[in-house]
Amino acid sequence: MILRLLLILSISIAARSASAAQTRDQMVLSDRDDVLGGGRWIYNDLKKGLEEAGRDGKPLLVVLRCVPCVACAAFDGQVLRYDEELQKLMEKFVRVRIVQANALDLSLFQFDTDVSFAAFFLNANRTVYGRYGTRSDRQQAEKDITMEGFRAALAGALKLHQGYPTNQESLRGKQPLPVKIRTPEQYPALAVKYSATLDYTTGKVAASCIHCHQLGEAQRKLFRAERQPIPDESLHPWPMPEVVGLFLDPKTRATVSQVAPGSAAARAGFRTGDEIVSLENQPLLSIADAQWILHHASAPASLNAVVQRSGGTQKLEMNLEKEWRRHSDISWRVSTWDLRRMATGGLVFKDLTTEERRVAGLGETALGLRVDFVGQYNDHAAGKRAGFLKNDVLVECDKLEGRMSESQLIAHLLQKRMPGDHVPAVILRGGKRLEMELPMQ
């Protein structure tokens, strides 16, 4: 255990040191040379991986990785240079590493695009066995992923592969849905700058790469360009199970570590220690699998579950309210930065603490969002140009005075207001109330 901890620590330190010492371009080039030199992975060539898996009868492990992103670099390093314990599982897969969203097949790879590490377990015929890779925090990017959980997902995928195609019906709900745009560079917002290939010739390889978070941004811009409200599914994508009261242990496939009192999960009868065998008739390999189901759930919704408890199985039914997904926090997401450009002119808001509310004379149910950051450049400086300052406290917006989070404020503005609107707002500054306007972009 001590040796394993030292290995993880050394990989983490090495990843951070490399990130600091290398430019973004050097990181991408070094990754390519390192992976190709190691000979363990097929690099940026899904077709080759599918052909090899079909020939050898193995399942595929496809890792999508944003190389210049420091988040999840330590975890990615462990997967890339797997130790003996992980090697026993990895050798049973054809391993493909993809480090660009350019030309990514969106009819196959559908995942939370705000993560910087995502894994797919596939059959050679492109059937999806499951997904791995979850993130819910900006600072602690790896708190929802573990080597134990990854190994458990790999073992579960192997079991599904061994049972295929007899289990094909249970995998039906895991398959990607039809898409209108097949590859990222076909989005209007991305087509003007990116092509289907990376530029390895001029030394500008990182600048030529479409980052995964840009996919979510490009999708939302479609709604904005057509002056349509951005739907909940796009504003609150890939909800964590915590949104419905389920806390899953990241060291397992899907074992409940906590159930929030009064939540939909609690009302359904989930208990700590339950191992969720299936949700909506789909076998779960990871938290990401649970997110897939929640992402595509309706509102309201009724989800069936089978859990293993005390040596037996039980069937549960979880009912979700109409606006259940709006409880998710999107403030940590990289793509929320573009939502702030649209809705708040580049302002970042933080909810006031109880003590700050007391000092400001605001009750617990009143709107009280403090300006924590003011964008300084281009469209992200629209809030600054409108006169907002850091530490201003928003107490009324669009005639709403009730308490809401920054996520809820952004969602309201992007569903009720359109580009060009000037939204009335009231702030507290130095103890005085000032009337302002938020410019919609």
Image: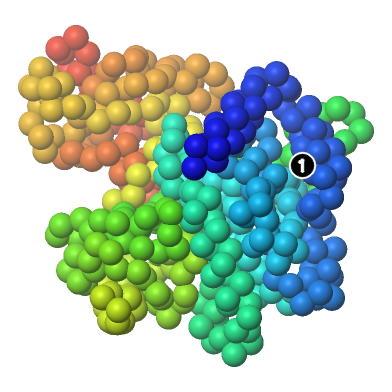
User: What residue would you read off at disc 1?
Assistant: 194
- Residue at 17% across, 68% down: 267
The residue furthest bottom is: 166
Element type where label 1 sits in the image: loop
In the rendered view, tell whether residue 68 sits above or below residue 111.
above
The residue furthest front is: 2
Q: Is residue 296 visible?
A: no
Residue 403 placement (x, y as % from top left): 18, 39
Q: Is residue 375 left or right of residue 316?
A: right
Residue 42 placement (x, y as % from top left): 81, 55
Count of labels shown?
1
Q: Residues within 10 Å of mark 1 (few under 14, many from 20)?
A: some
In the rendered view, tell whether residue 428 sits above or below residue 264.
above
The colour scheme of the drawn protein is rainbow
Q: Is residue 36 left or right of residue 292?
A: right
- Residue at 59% across, 26% down: 13
Q: Nearer the viewer, residue 312 or 101?
A: 312
Image quarter for residue 369? top left
